[in-house]
Image (cartoon, rainbow, N blue to C red):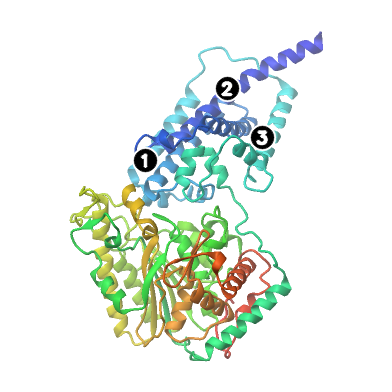
Amino acid sequence: MTTGGGAARAATALLPGLRRTGLLALAANGVLELSQLVGVEGWPWQFKQPAYPLMFLLGTLVVWLVVGLVQAVLGSFRVTAAVVLVAAVVLSFASHEKTRLLDEPLYPSDLHFAGDGGFLVDMIGVRAVLGLVVAVLLALAVALFLRPRRAPAPELEGRARIGVRVLTGVLCLASLAYLAGFNRPGNEARATYDALGAMWQPFSQKRNYLTNGFVGGVLFNMRVPTMQQPPGYDEVTMARIASRYARAAQHINRSRRPHGLDHVNVVMVLSESFSDPTRLSGVRLDEDPIPYTRSLLARTPSGAMLARDLGHGTANMEFEALTGMSMANLSARTGVPYQTLVPGHRTFPSVVGWLHRAGHATVAIHPFTTEMYRRREVYRAFGIDHFVHDTTMREHRRIGHDAFISDTSAFDELEHRLRTSKRPLLANVVTMQNHQPYTGRYDDPVGAHGPGGEDLPDLGQYARGLTYSDEALRDLVSWLRGFDEPTVLVFYGDHLPSTYPDDVVARNGLRMRETPYFVWSNVPGRVVAPPLVSPAHFVDLALEQVRAPVSPYYALLTELRRRVPAMESGRLFGADGQRLDPRTLSPQARRLLHDYRLVQYDLAMGHRWSEAALSGPVSGPSTPALASP
């Protein structure tokens, strides 16, 4: 009788705690879901699937594990409620603001920015941050200082209570650790979601979160292997591949100048959201926003760059351009290699190390916070000598009501670095002037109209920003023409803005992912630029433009560009911009693609067996190498 009575008392003490924490988990998950419903065009439930209630319950169970862990650590339900609700409010607000600004929800890797107050203020504004702080303080006050109106339920005492807390904490922590492997083969949590009807949409994370719930979307974006090991990967195979492209490099370099890069500056400009709105069907502007750029494209090796995303993805395009590694070879859920891949390495192969060995100095110029996409860590891994950012630039001019530093200031910094560098310079410039949001930025927006003649005010603001970028580019090229050092300039837009209405996006298809690029030099060049190209080929295009020799790595990229110049997410495109069927590719093209994938895996994820051999040298001691010194 005593034993039975003790068990009954224990159950009586535990049940209220289970009930309270369960209700808290339900409320917290509801708060998280609110971030997915605000700001969606039309009735947001149109995106929900029939199995959504089950997805919501699964998400609540996951949140319950978090609540249980916090309760086990803190031991007080009121404090647990405060911590959990405040965390839910902060995460919900952050996801809503990121979706509003960048058209993508919050990812697990984005928590890196949580402590960067300056970044938050710059991106969402002082009012929004102050509102969030007030909301958090109110939530804390309500949770901590409102006392329960009825007598507390009986609780366990002494050792039993401690034992229950320890057991609960261990079980919850172990379960959450298992959930962290959501994307690993055989994970039962993933299998449960799939069995209950989850509809994963990796190429539209906004829709992915809407369809499967906030928690489901977060789990789907948990870290996964960045790249699956290709078949045949071993040291012998990599040695054979390195030898093959060493011979290819020797063949290419017969028509190149042996020391053609020794005194040449290499400038790569990623222009934030730079595009040509006049190419889009259903859009009409009252004036051409980029007349100078258009004239330059007509007389310079140029074409369209294939962007991976619409409205975001800057760091991914920069990653491709600097490393020569295609995002198409990485897992669809890799996210941003600048956050998930590069910072995990002390050094990472890129054009930076390649040019270091050629005697170049290197500088990165980005007129924004150093923490954006963890660029400080990434540039350190690449081996960049100097990182010039918003607080270290010589000028900080802004145009109109723009919160971001102008392209003119960024280019003035570039000109200063080129003038004062005692060695040839590799300069990687990432501008910020045309970053979203656009509302109210300029007093004289360009008139912009949609398919039905309706006004598109945000597009008009964006187009006015393009006119300022066009003028800044004209001044930069004019300055480079008179500069007495040979210089090659690669200029490209990273993506189109997400400000276009859905009907414009639907009718334009691939054009919504094409931005202008060109390869210009103040010395005679000879490159033939593909009409459509991936940014992974910008360096080999620049080398061909100035007739500089290539290492085996860039020989591989040169050969690949001549057969498959653009690729993304399983799609391949030819030199004419037409989509290629992998089944009809020539044996040479198929071998190139397989070799490229093996090399990328080896350098990014594997043992780097091929790194030294692919680096060269191929034509003398001044020939650059791929890796950082």
Give left or right: position of 309 versus 69. Answer: left
Rendered location of residue 50, percent (x, y): 50, 32
Q: CA distance from mark 1 to mark 2?
A: 31 Å
Q: Earlier in the sequence, mark 1 or mark 2?
A: 2
Q: Quadrant of residue 423?
A: bottom left
Residue identifier under label 3: 172
Q: Earlier in the sequence, mark 3 or mark 2?
A: 2
Q: CA distance from mark 3 to mark 2?
A: 16 Å
Image disc number at residue 290: none
Residue name at image x 59 percent, y 77 percent:
629
- Residue 570 seen in the current view: yes
Q: Residue furthest top?
A: 1
Give left or right: position of 81 versus 286. Answer: right
Residue name at image x 32 percent, y 59 percent:
434
Rendered location of residue 403, percent (x, y): 31, 55
- Residue 401 seen in the current view: no
Rendered location of residue 541, percent (x, y): 45, 78
Residue type for callout 3: Cys
Residue type for callout 1: Leu
Residue identifier under label 2: 20
Give left or right: position of 44 versus 166. Answer: left
